[in-house]
Each structure stands twice: as C-alpha cells, then as structure tokens.
Image: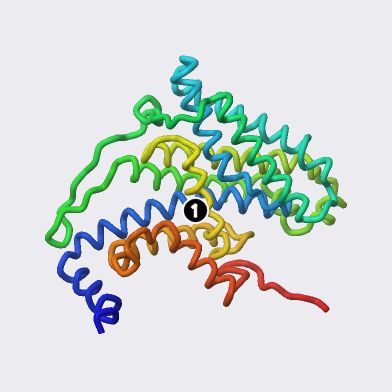
Amino acid sequence: MDLLNQIFIEPFVLIADIPDLFVQTLWEGFVSGILYALIALGFVLIFKASGVFNFAQGIMVVFAALALVSLHTKFGVPAWIALLMAIGIMGLLAIGIERIVLRPLVGQPDAILLMATIGLTLFLQGAGDTIFGGEPQSMITEQLGLPTGATDWEILGGRVTFQHIDVAAIVIAGLMVAGLALFFSKTRIGRALRAVADDHQAALSVGISLNQIWVIVWFAAGIVALVTGIMWGARSDVSFALEVIALKALAVLILGGFTSIPGAIVGGLIIGIGEKVFEVYWGGIFGGGVEAWFAYVLALIFLLFRPQGLFGEKIIERV
C-alpha cells in the first residue's frame, strides 16, 4: 500500500500543495527539452539528406563549443571573431568529412557508415583533447552578449525563477528552427536538399550534386551543434561530459522519428519535461538519479510498441 501511495497519491498531493514547484519543474524540463531537440535536429538533417546515422553529432557539440571558448580564452581572439572562426571550423570539418569519410564510402552498407561516424567520434574527441585541452572551461556568455542573471515571478502563490540564458536559449532555438524551415522551403538549395531526402536516385537524375548537398547538410548540423554547445555550456561548463548529455538525443530520435524535424522537437520536449517531473515527484521511489536513465527506458518502450516513432514513417518489411 505504501508503494501505491507513493506512486498514485503523494506526487499529486505535492503538486496541489506546492504548485509553483510544479511550474518551476515544467519550465526547467521545457528548456532541457529544447536543447535535446536541437541536438536531435542535427541528427535528423544528416539522416534525411544522406541516410547516415551520425553517431558523431554529440561530440560535434562539444568540439564546436571547445573551439569557440579556446579561441577566445587561450588564443586571445575577440569573442565575436572567435564565433565566426568556430563557424568556419565547422565548415572545414563538413568539407573534410564529405571528402575523407563519406565520398569513399558511397554505396557501402549502413553499418559501415555508422562505424565510420563512430570512428569520427573518437577522432574528434582525441583532436579536441589535444588541441583545446580536456579540462572543463567556462562558456564566454557575457562576451557574446548573452543575458545572465535571473528573474523571479510570483506564480500560483509561490516564486518561480527564470534564468535569462534559458529564455535566450528558447528564443534562439525558435529562430533557428524557423530559419531552417524557411531555408528548406524557400531556397533553391533547400529544395534540392528536400529532393535528396525524398529520393537520392531521382535527385541525381535531375543533376543535383549529392557531394555538395552532403557538405551543406553537415555544415548546417555543425552550426546547430555550435549553437547547442553555447547554450549547454552557458548552463554548465564546456567539457567532454556534454557528450553524455548529447547521447540523450538518440532517445529523442527514437521517440520522434529519425526523419522528422517536428518529431525531434516533440520528442525533445517529452524527454526533457518527463525526466524533470519524474525525478522530482517519483524519483524517491528509485532512490534518485532518474534523469540518468529515464530517456533510455522511454525509448525502449517506444522501440517495443512503436519503433518508427511518433512522426516517423511506418516500417514495412517485404518478404
């Protein structure tokens, strides 16, 4: 009876007694979910255009953030110039990946391409550690003009704290998603990307260069990784520990679907809000630490009952 009480009664009594805590938990989960969705967005962009599951997207977040911070703190480059240089580094990385990794492996099985991105992960981790150092670094939030501090609002008889950097993260994420949507729907390159995503062979038949498209997509994923790294780094230190957080984007993809941008957003929000709420109100049953495994358990449930995800294409096996 005590267990049933802890599951079905006590959490809802706590929500009714301290509603401002529930609002605070929802807000923090919403922000985390948006950042998870941004990481997953990089996966989706690459998978749609090339069919490659980019296991290296998580380390790209760390690599981009470390490049930005190190250019400013270790090499004395002004913050905004360091930002432009970091974007340039991700562009060069995209060209290098297309030339060295993707082009020689055209036509190879998906498993080979996956192993290539795992190798790319290890390479970027070693290169980042050698070039930028492995110690945690503080994000240059103020130097980039990002807001700091917090604002307290009286909500439902209590106080809810809104970190300014969290608000900025949501605004920037919204602008990025809107910009990508306009890019895909309104520009010639964007329409070519959509054509490649729909049918590679048909795109080739009308003269669309897959090599060029792959560079653009990996560059776009690199920019998404840089923005995500800045926002995560502003909430905590920039270090290779962020890669573990980025792995939750895999669970986001399983929930939302590997080819759906709306799915990445919805999946990120479900996991971000779900893990925070579950940690606060049901975490005591498991002794805490729910945030470490909640996303993966939820992803496993989806794999069992809806493997294509909420927005993914239905899997049809032909025999």
| Residue at the spot 61% in from the left edge and 71% down from the top edge | 307
Where is residue 103? Give x, y as percent: 81, 41
Give the structural element (helix, strand or loop) at label 1: helix
Mark 1 = which residue? 37
The structure residue drawn at horizontal position 55% and vertical position 28%, both measured from the top left corner, is: 86
Rendered view: 76 above or below 309: above
Number of marks present in the image shown: 1
Label 1: few (<14), some (14–19) or many (≥20) C-alpha neighbours in 10 Å: many
Q: Quadrant of the C terminus?
A: bottom right
Q: Quadrant of the N terminus?
A: bottom left
Q: Residue furthest left?
A: 157
As drawn, which residue projects farthest toward the bottom? 1
Looking at the rendered structure, the kind of residue marked 1 is Ala
Q: Is residue 232 above or below residue 292?
A: above
Residue 191: where, in percent of width, then height? 70, 50
Q: Is residue 34 left or right of residue 183?
A: left
Residue furthest right in the image: 205
Q: Quadrant of residue 18?
A: bottom left
User: Taking 66 as reference, is 23 left or right?
Assistant: left
- Residue 153: x and y, percent? 18, 51
Query: Which of the colour schemes (rainbow, by chain, secondary structure, one colour) is used?
Result: rainbow
Q: Looking at the picture, how far across and down is residue 162, in whole percent? A: 26, 47
Residue at 37 percent across and 56 percent down: it is: 30
